[in-house]
Image (tube, helix red, strand yellow):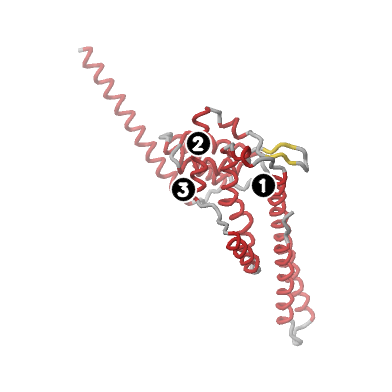
Amino acid sequence: MIRLSAVLLMLGLACFEFGNIAAECAEPTMGLNSLLQLEAVLVKHLESYVDKVQNEQETISSYLTDIDNLHEHMNSTEEYYGNPINAFLTINRFASLWKHEIFDVLLANNTHSEYINAIDSEMDKKKLRGPTNEDLLIAAGNLLDMQELTGIPTSELANEVVLRDFYTDKNVTLSASECYEIGRSFYDLQSYEYAAQWLQQARKRASLETSASASKIHILEHLALVYKKLNNTKLAYKLTNEILKLEPTNQAALNTKTLLQTELLLDRIRISKVTVDEQTDENHLEL
């Protein structure tokens, strides 16, 4: 099991730093009431910090447990990676989960350098490298080829069992975040129909998951982009309004809404013109 000593070390060093701050501020000339106020400030900020670290520790611990579980119960790598979904998920863990949910959290703290140096040293020693965005798109392309070739519905693929949780004895299917990453990759590959289907699956799962990594706003933003590419301006406009319900000050959505309103208005004008022209043609034929 991967240890979380780095997170615990962060907490310990933070407590030490708070001690230094308190020692510098608590000069003999300060009254006892001021010391009590200082303690109240320290308690408030330290409690907030402890809560933050505990939440980060629980989240990271959950990810590490899942990955350990996957490695431990993988019988055959050839069989496992024979499924393009598993290949995509493995690369995506490095592009998304490891980077944003684990390393970025650790990098946000001042004690990360020793931890990162140790990782870099071992990677150099073993000549390892992390996957690139190009690797992720190649994996997404293989998954797209498989889906187009087999014709398996997106809803069925999204519900495929990708992991057996031996602690809860339950099957694990794709999460909202994973469906979102597949949809986003398909968007980059300009496969907009399939991108829309995967993003819709992400949207459904995000509404059910209590702690979805992919936020509803990010999912809706990509869905609006996809439907704009599919020339479905009405649906893109509807999705943009959903974003603004969740976040009324979202500047990107406000700008997009203005552009979509203009397009919808122009569409109405074009439709009206075509209707008038058709009616005129019919009148000429009657004459």
Amino acid at dot 3: Leu
For mark 2, give the secondary structure.
helix
First of labels 2, 3 by sequence position: 2
Q: Residue furthest bottom?
A: 29
Q: Where is mark 3, residue-wise?
A: 254
Amino acid at dot 2: Leu
Name the image quarter holding residue 231. top left
Q: Position of residue 205 (x, y in %)?
A: 63, 38
Q: Where is mark 1, residue-wise?
A: 211
* Of residues 71 and 192, the one drawn nearer to the viewer in this rendering: 71
Amino acid at dot 1: Ser
For mark 3, give the secondary structure.
helix
Q: Position of residue 281 (x, y in %)?
A: 24, 19
Name the image quarter holding residue 102. bottom right
First of labels 1, 2 by sequence position: 2
Q: Position of residue 217 (x, y in %)?
A: 55, 46
For mark 1, give the secondary structure.
loop
Q: Where is mark 2, residue-wise?
A: 144
- Does the image show residue 126? yes
